[in-house]
């Protein structure tokens, strides 16, 4: 009896050594699961205050989220398998070689956010690849209903310039886009999930006469309005009055002041993506879960995720979504929806009260 309990105490001690408590006390007063996470508390405070102008979900947050994608997707395992230059994935190359990579047609406009982010990455001495993913995760956490994304640290600061042509364009067909993502191991359903990012998004460069025109009516909320509004009939061309043709990559929009990308239009209606698309309309939390899972995959492209350290604890907990279920914008009704999922009828949604109004641009 006596010797038995001695044994179990010894066994417990062995167990405790086998799973050491790694909690680190940081010099900034935080405690962290790993000392490599400490620096990110400082980065968080700095960018929330200064880059995101008081934790806002405005243009800098939107562009920071877009930047996570453009750094990661410039990666092609099939080119690498052919012995060609296939880029490095989420490696910070868009910041290190910003002169080259932000001049790619697909990345027009990203020079501004790269220039704004660079001083913070240098000041806190963190790798460019990690900084870009951190800023995107913090930026989207500032949006109402935003996700709390995983954040891993430890991406190398070494990178080479990515080849052009790997980042999807709004004029690309669904076939082209689905094939491009398949090359990096991202499925059609996961593309739809990633496009929840377009619920906190606006354009400046597709149709430059309507700077800041969002892709849905609620660009500061990470909600499912984007997935409803992309299915409304396109009826108008939002642009300055003297513009008479749609821009490249643009299709007819349902609402004044809102811009619709051809890529979003196609993916909303393609039979490989339409059912996933529609499935977000009745559940903001399902949309958020799918986005979080797809981002977990996208943000480590080109990296060995098992060698990275999980510092997700630093990412703030976002405020809840204003609405769990999407609605039809004022002035439209159920018959304006173009349902595209053959398996399931489009759900009946409530109609927002009031008269149709023009969508307000995102200030820059
Ligand atoms: C199907 C592939 C995609 C295409 C063709 C595409 C295309 C575009 C285009 C043309 C813009 C407007 C840029 C401008 O004129 O300023 C834009 C904005 C944006 N995109 Fe995408 N995108 C895609 C996927 C993604 C993904 C996967 C993410 C993130 C995970 C993302 C995040 C964003 C964000 C947040 C914005 C708004 C930027 C702002 O408001 O300043 N996009 N996208
Ligand atoms: C910055 O980080 C690099 C790489 O981790 C390290 O070698 C260097 O000593 C750091 N510099 C400072 C000033 O802490
Ligand atoms: C990352 O590389 C850039 C140069 O490309 C350098 O200025 C910066 O100090 C490096 N950061 C770290 C953490 O090594
Ligand atoms: C999807 O649509 C294409 C044409 O747009 C058609 O060829 C294909 O058979 C459809 N697939 C399914 C599963 O409905
Ligand atoms: C729905 O809206 C369309 C125009 O967007 C209009 O023509 C139609 O009469 C409306 N239907 C109902 C039932 O209000």
Image (spheres, rainbow, N blue to C red):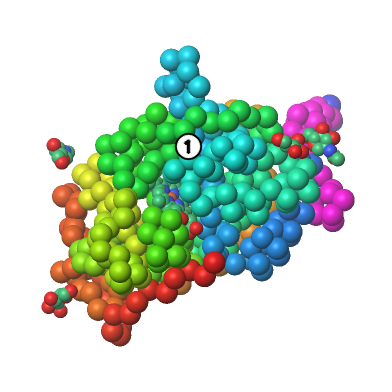
Residue 261 appears left or right of 323: left
Residue 137 showing in the rendered view: no
Q: Total of numbered circles in the picture?
A: 1
Residue 88 appears left or right of 262: right
Given the current orientation, which residue lies at the most extreme front position? 242
Ligand 1 within 8 angstroms of badge 1 C-beta:
yes
Identify which residue is drawn at 66% across, 68% down: 54
Residue 20 is inside the magenta segment: yes
Identify which residue is drawn at 44% across, 43% down: 105
Given the current orientation, which residue lies at the most extreme bottom position? 354
Identify which residue is drawn at 63% across, 29% down: 159
Is residue 226 shown above or below 322? above
Q: Nearer the viewer, residue 55 or 112?
A: 112
Return the residue at label 1. 73
Residue 49: quarter of image: bottom right
Q: Nearer the viewer, residue 170 or 354?
A: 170
- Please state the quadrant of the image where ligand 5 appears: bottom left
Is residue 7 shown above or below 269? above
Quarter of the image with the N terminus in it:
top right
Residue 260 is inside the magenta segment: no
Identify which residue is drawn at 27% across, 37% down: 175
Residue 203 appears left or right of 44: left
Quarter of the image with the C terminus in it:
bottom right
Task: Measuring from the top left, give residue 43's x and y in whole percent.
Answer: 73, 53
The segment highlighted magenta reads 4-31
């Amino acid at each position: 009896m006596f010797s038995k309990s001695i044994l179990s105490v010894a066994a417990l001690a062995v167990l405790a050594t086998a799973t050491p408590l790694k909690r680190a006390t940081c010099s900034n007063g935080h405690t962290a699961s790993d000392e490599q996470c400490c620096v990110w508390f400082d980065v968080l405070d700095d960018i929330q205050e200064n880059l995101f102008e008081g934790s806002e979900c405005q243009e800098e947050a939107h562009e920071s989220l877009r930047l996570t994608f453009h750094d990661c997707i410039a990666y092609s395992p099939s080119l690498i398998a052919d012995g060609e230059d296939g880029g490095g994935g989420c490696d910070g190359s868009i910041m290190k070689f910003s002169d080259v990579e932000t001049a790619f047609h697909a990345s027009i406009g990203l020079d501004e956010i790269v220039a704004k982010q660079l001083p913070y990455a240098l000041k806190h001495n963190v790798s460019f690849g990690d900084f870009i993913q951190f800023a995107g995760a913090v930026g989207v956490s500032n949006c109402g209903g935003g996700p709390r994304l995983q954040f891993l640290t430890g991406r190398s600061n070494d990178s080479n310039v990515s080849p052009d042509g790997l980042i999807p364009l709004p004029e690309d067909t669904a076939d082209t886009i689905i094939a491009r993502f398949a090359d990096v191991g991202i499925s059609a359903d996961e593309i739809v999930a990633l496009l929840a990012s377009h619920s906190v998004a606006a354009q400046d460069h597709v149709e430059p006469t309507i700077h800041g025109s969002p892709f849905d009516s609620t660009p500061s909320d990470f909600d499912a309005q984007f997935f409803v509004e992309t299915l409304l009939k396109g009826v108008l061309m939002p642009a300055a009055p003297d513009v008479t043709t749609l821009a490249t990559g643009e299709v007819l929009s349902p609402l004044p002041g809102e811009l619709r990308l051809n890529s979003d239009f196609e993916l909303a209606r393609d039979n490989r993506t339409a059912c996933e698309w529609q499935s977000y309309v009745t559940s903001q939390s399902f949309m958020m879960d799918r986005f979080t899972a797809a981002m977990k995959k996208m943000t480590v492209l080109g990296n060995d995720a098992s060698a990275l350290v999980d510092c997700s604890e630093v990412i703030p907990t976002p405020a809840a979504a204003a609405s769990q279920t999407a609605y039809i914008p004022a002035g439209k009704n159920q018959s304006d929806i173009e349902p595209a999922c053959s398996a399931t009828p489009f759900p009946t949604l409530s109609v927002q009260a009031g008269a149709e109004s023009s969508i307000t641009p995102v200030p820059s």
